[in-house]
Image (tube, rainbow, N blue to C red):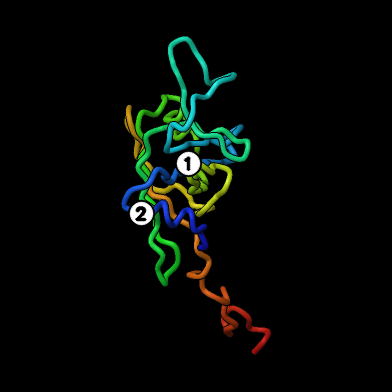
Amino acid sequence: MTVSVGFRQAVYAPETGRFPIALITIDHDDLTTPIRISTDPTQRLTGEGYTTDTEVVYGTVSRGETFVFFPVRLKLPDDTDEGPGEMQIEIDNVHQQYTDTIREIQSPATFNVELVLDNTPDTVEAQWPEFELRHVQYNESTITGTLKMETFEKEPYPSGSFTPAQFPGLF
């Protein structure tokens, strides 16, 4: 994975005014629109669905898409010889709507995790696409889960063997 010099300087510097933001897109066939989450309250969101009399909503706008801020703990995957590792995610202060959505979905949701810098939210520095949510647990205040990538490298190749039992006409 190649990242910009500015991103590396911000990540490795002992002190800096820059910081990375994780943008998480959750998608599933049962969802009408993807759920977009930001790990940073970059700006106050305005407009339909974001401003109410009782609640102020913050988030990040990147490439024209709005990511709503939720406190999230994300452990990025290790890069090993066996392929991409697992990610761990924990989302705090979730709305009841998201818990209800998890209960209704029968197959794994797809997660796309992107890292951007706070001063360049439209430039994706690193990306982990197509991770599936597995081993999900939830309660009234958090949703936790393991994100895994389907690796086809572990599938047997070829998938079948030409043996007399399976293909008697060849022998």
Q: Is residue 152 visible?
A: yes
**Left or right of residue 67: residue 140:** left
x, y percentage for residue 156? 51, 73
Q: Quadrant of residue 80?
A: bottom left
Query: Is 96 situated above or below 131?
Result: above
Query: Is 113 situated above or below 72?
Result: below
Extreme residue toward the bottom, this view:
171
The residue drawn where x is 45% and y is 30% is 98
**Left or right of residue 42: residue 159:** right
Q: Mark 2 and 1 residues: CB-CB less than 8 Å, in contact?
A: no
Please name the residue that numbered disc 1 is placed on: 118
Mark 2 Cα shell of 10 Å, populated few (<14), some (14-19), many (≥20): few
Q: Which amino acid does label 2 sit on?
A: Ala
Counting residues from the start of the chain, the first of labels 2 and 1 encountered is 2
Mark 1 Cα shell of 10 Å, populated few (<14), some (14-19), many (≥20): some
Extreme residue toward the right, this view:
169
The residue drawn where x is 49% and y is 52% is 131
Regarding mark 2 in the picture, which secondary structure is present there?
A: loop
The residue drawn where x is 34% and y is 33% is 142
Viewer-nearest residue: 37 or 132: 37
Image disc number at residue 95: none
- Quadrant that contains the C terminus: bottom right
Q: What residue type is labelled 1?
A: Asp
Please name the residue that numbered disc 2 is placed on: 13
x, y percentage for residue 52? 50, 13
**How far apart are the alpha carbons under marks 2 and 1?**
15 Å
Extreme residue toward the top, this view:
53
The residue drawn where x is 45% and y is 35% is 102
